[in-house]
């Protein structure tokens, strides 16, 4: 079915056994030669909601440039089946396999991945065992260390406790992890986080992986006065290059839309990403 408006996007539910995944497919418009297709891998928890508009704007721009885009809400996220508290990393990877299969059945190839934040980490992990070649992997402000990211996420709970005068309740990030190890679900910023999901994310550290065989385009938000990677991220980029990775790092001077209180447009990201897909 067609979504409201004249964007030409097709909204549907992708069968996943007993469940369904909500998808939005942006086909290339009439008269535009389609050169490939892209799976959008959204960010984690509330960052997904903050990125919704930018994902839609970028998807339309890519479709107009000749790259059809499939947006999929992963299990427990958005309008898909399930609760976030029941989500697991392996289920999310299976969702990407389902999306890949749906595109292949339509003859939509070659396939690229476009991951945002934690979605970038998921895209890289998926690419490690993808069942077919990935033409490009495009990363927006990627998360490369699952444990470090979760510690930042846990601090949201600690900050909320502090505001409410209960800063000792959770015993810091270590206390949160101990509760998870004991099998408890933890609610953070309105999201139930299961121990199994945390265990799946905690073990992900990109610096321990072999670089992807596909070309990687890493888009990093930087201060215009200091257009460079932070030391730890530069170390990873250098290591990948030394191991023969096809890696390009592009700097973007635009708002960090995934963290802003209000929904903002960031055309700098759209133009930079569209340019990446138009490169040979």
Image (cartoon, rainbow, N blue to C red):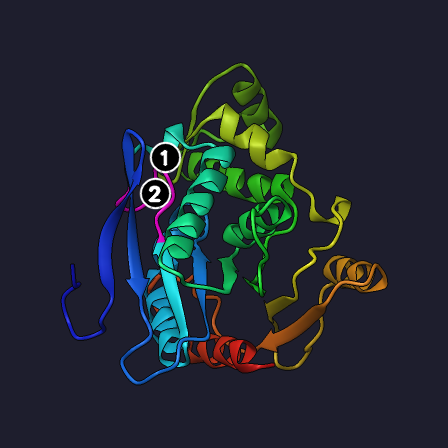
Mark 1 burial class by Cα count in 10 Å: few <14, some 14-19, many 20+: some
Q: Picture quarter containing residue 238?
A: bottom right
The residue depicted at 38 percent of the width and 53 percent of the height is: 105
> Is there any visible trace of residue 265 in the rendered image?
no
Residue 30, disc: none
The answer to whether residue 105 is left or right of residue 214 is: left
The answer to whether residue 149 is left or right of residue 43 is: right
> Is there any visible trace of residue 175 in the rendered image?
yes
Locate the N terminus by quadrant: bottom left
Mark 2 burial class by Cα count in 10 Å: few <14, some 14-19, many 20+: many
- Reply yes or no: does residue 79 show up in magenta: yes
Q: CA distance from mark 1 to mark 2?
A: 6 Å
Q: Picture quarter containing residue 252?
A: bottom right
**What span is colored magenta in the figure?**
72-81
Residue 77, disc: 2
* Residue 175 screen position, x and y as percent: 58, 24
> Tags 1 and 2 in contact by the CB under 8 Å rule?
yes
Residue identified by numbered label 1: 84
Q: Picture quarter containing residue 202?
A: top right
The answer to whether residue 241 is left or right of residue 62 is: right
- Helix, strand or loop at disc 2? loop
Rendered position, 82 above or below 159:
above
164 and 5: which is toward the camera: 5
Rendered position, 117 above or below 79:
below
The residue depicted at 59 percent of the width and 39 percent of the height is: 151
Magenta span: chief secondary structure: loop
* Residue 120 screen position, x and y as percent: 55, 54
- Helix, strand or loop at disc 1? helix
Earlier sequence position, callout 1 versus callout 2: 2
The residue depicted at 50 percent of the width and 16 percent of the height is: 183
- Reply yes or no: does residue 92 show up in magenta: no
* Residue 71 screen position, x and y as percent: 36, 57
């Amino acid at each position: 079915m067609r979504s409201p408006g004249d964007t030409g996007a097709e909204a549907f539910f992708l069968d996943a056994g007993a469940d369904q995944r909500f998808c939005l497919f942006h086909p290339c418009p009439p008269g535009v030669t389609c050169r490939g297709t892209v799976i959008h891998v959204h960010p984690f928890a509330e960052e997904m909601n903050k990125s919704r508009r930018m994902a839609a704007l970028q998807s339309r721009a890519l479709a107009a440039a000749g790259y059809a885009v499939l947006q999929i809400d992963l299990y427990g996220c958005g309008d898909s089946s399930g609760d976030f508290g029941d989500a697991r990393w392996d289920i999310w990877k299976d969702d990407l396999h389902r999306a890949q299969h749906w595109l292949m059945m339509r003859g939509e190839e070659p396939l690229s991945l476009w991951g945002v934040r934690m979605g970038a980490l998921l895209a890289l992990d998926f690419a490690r065992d993808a069942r077919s070649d990935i033409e490009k992997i495009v990363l927006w402000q990627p998360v490369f260390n699952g444990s470090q990211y979760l510690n930042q996420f846990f601090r949201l709970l600690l900050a909320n406790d502090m505001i409410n005068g209960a800063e000792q309740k959770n015993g810091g990030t270590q206390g949160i992890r101990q509760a998870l190890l004991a099998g408890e679900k933890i609610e953070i910023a309105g999201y139930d986080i299961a121990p199994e999901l945390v265990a799946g994310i905690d073990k992900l550290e990109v610096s321990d992986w072999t670089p992807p065989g596909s070309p990687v385009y890493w888009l990093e938000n930087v201060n215009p006065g200091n257009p460079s990677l932070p030391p730890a991220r530069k170390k990873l980029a250098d290591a990948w290059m030394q191991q023969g990775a096809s890696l390009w790092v592009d700097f973007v001077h635009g708002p960090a839309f995934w963290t802003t209180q209000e929904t903002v447009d960031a055309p700098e990201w759209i133009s930079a990403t569209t340019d990446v897909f138009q490169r040979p």
